[in-house]
Image (cartoon, helix red, strand yellow):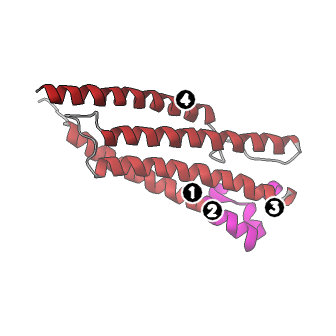
Amino acid sequence: MKLQITSSEILKVLHVVSWIIFIGLCINAGGFLFNSLFALYYNPMAANNFWQGIDLSSLYNFDKGYFLVITFFMFIVGTLKAILFYLIVKLIHDKNLNLNQPFNNKMTQFIVSVAYLALGISFFSKWGADNLKWLNGKGVQMPAIQDLNLGGADVWFFMGIIFWVLKQLFKRGETIQAENDLTI
C-alpha cells in the first residue's frame, strides 16, 4: 500500500495550522496590550505576574514610561507576527497560490509584504532588546529577551533578506512566464 499525499491536501493542512498559529499570535499580542493597560491604569500589582507569568514589577517600579515602552515593543512585535500569519492564511484561503503558474503578481506582492514584515519584526525586536540591555545596565531586573518575545532579531533580519531575494526571483519569473505565454 502506497500513501500519496497531494499538494491540495498539504495546503489544507497548512491552512489549518496557519489559522491556529494566527489565532495564538493574536491572543499573545492582545495579552500584551491588555496586561500593559491593566497594570498602568487599574492594578499595578499586575506587573508582578504579567502575561505568561513574566515578572515586570522591577521595571514598573523603576519607571512607568519604560514599562510602557518595553510592553509597546512586545505588542508591536507580536502584532507584526500575527499580521505575517494573517497574510499566509489569506494567501491560502483566497487560493492565490497557483502551483501551475506560481510566478504571478499576487505571489510577488505576498513575498514583498512578508519581507517588509520580517524586517519590521527584526527592527523592533532589536530595538526592544537594546532597551532591555540598557535597563539591565541601570540595575533593573529584567526577564530574558526570549521570555518577552523580543529575541531572534538577527533571524528575522536574515529571513527578510531571503524574502527580498525571492521577490527578485519571482519578478524575473513573472517576466519569463509572460514571455512564454505570449509565444504559445
| Image coordinates for residue 159, horizontal then vertical, percent | 51, 32
Q: Earlier in the sequence, mark 1 or mark 4?
A: 1
The residue labelled by disc 4 is: 158
- Quarter of the image for residue 59 reads bottom right
**Distance of label 1 from label 4 (alpha carbons):** 23 Å
**Distance of label 3 from label 1 (alpha carbons):** 20 Å
Q: Main secondary structure of the magenta part?
A: helix
User: Which residue type carries mark 4?
Assistant: Phe
The residue labelled by disc 3 is: 64
Give the extent of the magenta segment: 32-59
Q: Earlier in the sequence, mark 2 or mark 4?
A: 2
User: Which residue type carries mark 3?
Assistant: Lys
Q: Which is more toward the observer, 32 or 183?
A: 183
Q: Earlier in the sequence, mark 4 or mark 3?
A: 3
Q: Which is more toward the observer, 67 or 110?
A: 110
The residue labelled by disc 2 is: 33
The residue labelled by disc 1 is: 29
Does residue 19 appear to the left or right of 124 in the view shown? left
The local secondary structure at tag 3 comes to helix
Residue at 62 percent of width and 46 percent of height: 149
Q: Is residue 16 magenta?
A: no
Residue at 74 percent of width and 72 percent of height: 41
Q: Are marks 1 and 4 in contact (CB under 8 Å)?
A: no
- Near mark 4 (Cα within 10 A), the count class, few <14, some 14-19 or many ≥20, is some
**Distance of label 2 from label 4 (alpha carbons):** 28 Å
